Structure formats: C-alpha cells, structure tokens
Image (cartoon, rainbow, N blue to C red):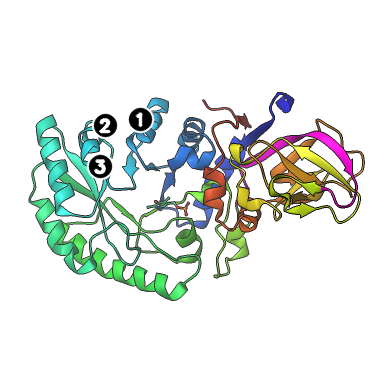
Amino acid sequence: MTKQYRCWAEVDLNALRENLAQIRNVLAPAKRVLTVVKADAYGHGLRQIAAILMQSGTDIFGVANLAEARAIRSVGKGWPVLMLGACLPSEIDHAVRDEVMATVSSLEEAKGFSAAAKRLGKTAWVHLKINTGMGRLGIAPDQAGSLLQAIRELPAVEVKGLCTHYSSAEDDAEFTQRQRASFAALVQALAHQAGGPFEWLHASSSGGLLLEPDSLCNTVRPGLLVYGVVPKGKRPIDRRFAECVRPALTWKCQVSLVRQVPAGTPISYGHTYLTPKSMHVAIVTAGYGDGYLRAGSHRAQVLIGRQRCAVLGRVTMDQMVVDVTAVPDVRPGDEVVLIGQQGQQQITANDLAEWCHTIPWEVLTNITYRVPRIYRGSHAA
Ligand SMILES: *Cc1c(COP(=O)(O)O)cnc(C)c1O
C-alpha cells in the first residue's frame, strides 16, 4: 500500500497511546500531563496526534502558535491549551477570544491581555513564567513577587499558573538543581501572595521529567518523550525510564535503482566520495527535500535488507546513494528505513541526529510536507 510513495512516514498511534500511559506510570498519580504538540506534533501530524492524546487522557496541550491551538479545538473542545511562547501583540485578541492560556513574562504583556479581555468581555488566563536560568522567557525571580502583585491588580486577567523551564536538564545536574531550588523557593512565597496554590505548576519537559525529582509541581510538559524518543545527554537516565517508551514514527523510502560501479567512481555532487573498490550502490528515494538533513552526507546510515548501509557522498534534494555491496539481492522497490526498525537493526532519531550533528527534535520537525504521514494502529481522526 505504501509502495505508491517515494518517501513516507508511518506513525503508530498505539505507540503514542502507550507512551502517554507509560509516562503517567512513572509519575506520581496526581500529576497532570501537558503534552507538547507544537510544530505539527513534532512532525507527526497535529490533528491525528491531538485526537489520540485526547482519547488517551492528556490533561492539557502545549502549542507554539494560535493556528495550532485552533487545530486542536477543531478536533475536540474542552481541553485547556497553553501557548508556550510569548504572544505577539497581534495575537492577543485571538488568544483571549479562543480561551487559549498565555505564557506571560512581563507587566506589559499582562496589560495587553487585560485590555483585550476587557474589550471582549472575557477573562484572560495567563501562566506567569519565571526565568530561573533558561534565559529566554520569564521574569527574574527577585521581581516575580511585584509582577504577580501588579498583574493581580489588573482587571480581566487571572493568573492560572506558574512555570519555569530548564535549560540543561539532560546535561547539567547541578545547574538544573539550582533552577529547581530557585523555582521552589518562589512557589511558596507566590502561592501565599496569590491566596492559594496555583492551578497549574510546571517546570519539566522530557529531560526534567526523566532526571529531576519533582514533588513541587502538579504538571509536567513532555514533548519528545510522548513521541517515544528519549533525550540523550551527559546525565545517565534510569533504564526503567529510558525503556518505557517506543518511537511512534518510522521513516521510509525505496530503492529506485541498483548499480555496480568500478573502483574510482566519483559519487554525487562535488565528487566528495570516490569508490575505493568495485561496489554495489543503491539509489534511494529520499533527500533533503524530504527533510533528510544534508549534514548526514558521508556519515548517515540507512537499513536495506535488514542491514546497515552507509550513505555515500552528498545527500541531494530527492535522492541519495548508499552502499549495498554487502547486501544480497537488492532490487528497485525494496524498502529503505531511514528511522525505524528492520529485522534486528534499528536506527533511532537520536542516531540520525548524531550523524547529522544535531538533535532529535530537529530531525523530526525537519521532515517536510512532501512526506505523507501514514497512520497505523487505533484510528482516531
Ligand atoms: C517544547 C517545549 C517543551 C517540550 O520539550 P521536550 O524536550 O520535547 O519534552 C516543554 N516546555 C516548553 C516551554 C517547550 O517550549
């Protein structure tokens, strides 16, 4: 059925469902899960993923823009949605009208929400972000008290949550613990000031969830882990956690041509690879136009005939050349795995990221629109 595509991604919806259940398993029972579905659900397809996560009991969604929030609402109403980035001035009205919660770091933003909400006859819901070390959004901890006070004095704005973001959870235990301590110290004081606990209290994305004990927050914010990819860094991750999820996405293409080439044959643009001996090469139907990073030239591997095959020379827009000398009987139409399993062999998003000198988040979100996503498992939308 997939033979009609040159390059495609298969998304296993059961894996997503089970990953969310497994994440819940490793958390304290009362903890709520904000599933992050920005960037088309990390390239998996926002509508389908939102539907399956709704069925699987996500508590709240995290998005990067209002189009994503609207897509979620079109699949199912009633789920809270949090904008993770700062709203643009031009987005504030929409956010308030669509009842999307906003992440706010300054009084200026809060005033914008207050004015919009008043004008629209609504209440704007915001989460106050604290910069404990990420250095992107958020108010400095020592100014958080006065900001909260000022926001509480604005009409039509309600502070629904308090949050922070770890910058180095996968790599730097000491720095992360300092961030956590700084947030913890504030939470007590601000909750007292707000006259009660915050409805949403959150700090951990996938890395934090796996590596930082967290009795303080009532919500976690995993993205990558929900899709079954464990973030890799310098800090060792408990195997019990690292093996609790499985990748939902498999990325494939096909062999279009097989050639026997003599020693000394230059391969692909720039002649950056010369065959050292007589070789069997396969041309496969994926390239950077499909989002296969060109940085994988000379370094990446694919699976053909249940074996690992090296990418030779430069990755081109729609094709690449791979070494199939050691693979018997390769034929046009054979399936090629770019990410996923074939027999005993597996290539993970982490592997491909390492070959391409990048991170699995980029590998996944880089898969382009040209690549159809084929859904397997329990259908939702
Ligand atoms: C993207 C994002 C997340 C999810 O991060 P993962 O590492 O994919 O789990 C969590 N929180 C915020 C604020 C984000 O922007």
Residue 70's label in the rendered image is 1
Which amino acid type corresponds to the residue marked 3 in the rendered image?
Leu
How many angstroms separate mark 2 from mark 3 (CA)? 15 Å
In this view, the residue in front, 321 or 345, is: 321
Residue 88's label in the rendered image is 3
How many angstroms separate mark 1 from mark 2 (CA)? 8 Å
Ranked by sequence position, the earlier of labels 2 and 3 is 3
Vertical placement of residue 272 versus 125, above or below:
below
Which quadrant, please, contains the N terminus? top right
How many angstroms separate mark 3 from mark 1 (CA)? 16 Å
Mark 2 or 3: in front is: 3
Q: Is residue 282 left or right of residue 301?
A: right
Residue 98's label in the rendered image is 2
Task: Give the residue at x 10% y 32%.
Answer: 119
Vertical placement of residue 121 versus 292, above or below:
above
Which amino acid type corresponds to the residue marked 2 in the rendered image?
Asp
Is there CB contact under 8 Å for labels 2 and 3? no
- Was residue 300 drawn as part of the magenta stretch in this picture? no
Measured from the top left, where is residue 165 in percent x and y?
Answer: 36, 59
In this view, the residue in front, 322 or 307, is: 322
- Magenta stretch: give its range: 245-265
